[in-house]
Image (cartoon, rainbow, N blue to C red):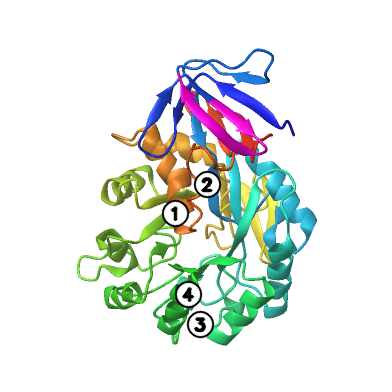
Amino acid sequence: MENTFYIYGGKAFIDGEASLNRPLIKVSQGKIDTVAENALPPEGATVYELRDDDVILPGFIDIHIHGANGADTMDGTNEALSTIARFLPREGVTSFLATTITSGTEETSHALKTAGQYKSESGAELLGIHLEGPFISPEQAGAQPSTHIVPPDLQLFKEWQKISGDNIRIVTFAPEQKNGQELMKHFYATGVLGSVGHSDATYTDMQEAESNGLSHGTHLFNRMRPLHHREPGVVGSVYLSERIKAELILDEIHVSPEVAHLSYQVLGSDRLILISDAIRGKGLPEGEYDLGGQKVTIQNREARLEDGSLAGSVLQMDQAVRNALKFRNISWSDIVKITSLNAAKSLQIDHRKGRITEGYDADLVILSHDGYVEKTFCRGEHQ
């Protein structure tokens, strides 16, 4: 890794609000050293010079991804996590949460231990773990193996959090299940982000969960009680909330472009977080793959179980950005929020990630004006 270099030119969108034309960004020792406008790089320096219409954004943060390029979090190996981490920068992702799937207790424990001890050496940085299941609703299992679903269990979660080295950052759970609200209170008290998902919660359940600290929703619309004109369900409750941020799989398959656009209009750029929910088949040819011991067929950009249910995605985050750019009245500053800053805030790491600011990690993605990745830097390392 070069200790010091400069990025010069293009247009930088630095914090979800401000932007700079033809900035000079100095990177040193993996951090952003200075960000200046109307300045030139010193002679003899290493410089990445950009076109005028190039776009510089904080690196994307994918808080919900199971796997990529043949690897999955549940493989429970450092090699699998390294494979995912090395693959992600090509789509602009500079950090991520390793996401589990509902599985047996021993298998989950092993995956949590491995991910909790993993240290990112190159590629995207592993920020922690997203525990998806097993504390979910059997009625909303989707691609989560129903045989391993269990009621919310505070003691089991405490054991898993210890095994992970306190690295579980998000838990997808169903608050309406027995002891679900007790679990939500524990999440809030210990700084874990409880996320409603795979849930059949009613509006009343959601109000109670929000009063207990709920502030996140897992892949909006997918496997949750839908909006009904006499029962808002999970979707309507998220819409009506002022605090809940919601993940969205913006592949135009999980949620139609029109409903995705509607959700953006309702939630705005402050409460939407783009995710991939990708599985091991991402980046590989169409065919058959495994997800939680289930056969998944990938065809026409869709990943489905044998019964036809969607089973994660093969979405790359830069494609999600290009899909988002179709929304009416969306700006590149809005893109910063929904791909990076909102996730950083939810994970309470926005003091070092999610902005192009002095002292922050040098996590940067350079895009063409139409949203294609040209260069990615992970903590100052050009990928």
The answer to whether residue 163 of the structure is visible from this angle is yes
Question: Is 369 placed above or below 327 here?
Answer: above
The CA span between labels 4 and 2 is: 23 Å
Give the quarter of the figure containing the N terminus. Answer: top right
Q: Residues within 10 Å of mark 2 (few under 14, many from 20)?
A: many
Indicate left or right for 370 with 110 as reference.
left
The disc at residue 353 is 2
The CA span between labels 1 and 2 is: 9 Å
Q: Which amino acid type is marked by label 4?
A: Phe
Residue occupied by mark 4 = 187
Q: Residues within 10 Å of mark 1 (few under 14, many from 20)?
A: some
Residue occupied by mark 3 = 152
Magenta segment range?
A: 25-37
Q: Which residue is depicted at the point 74% across and 65% down?
A: 114
The CA span between labels 3 and 4 is: 12 Å
- Near-viewer residue (344 or 203): 344
Residue most toward the top? 43
Question: Is 111 placed above or below 39 here?
Answer: below
Mark sitting earlier along the chain (2/3): 3
Measured from the top left, where is residue 66 in percent x and y? 62, 57
Q: Residues within 10 Å of mark 3 (few under 14, many from 20)?
A: many
Measured from the top left, where is residue 370 in percent x and y? 46, 25
The CA span between labels 1 and 4 is: 16 Å
Give yes or no for contact between labels 4 and 2 (Cβ–Cβ under 8 Å).
Answer: no
- Near-viewer residue (281 or 159): 159
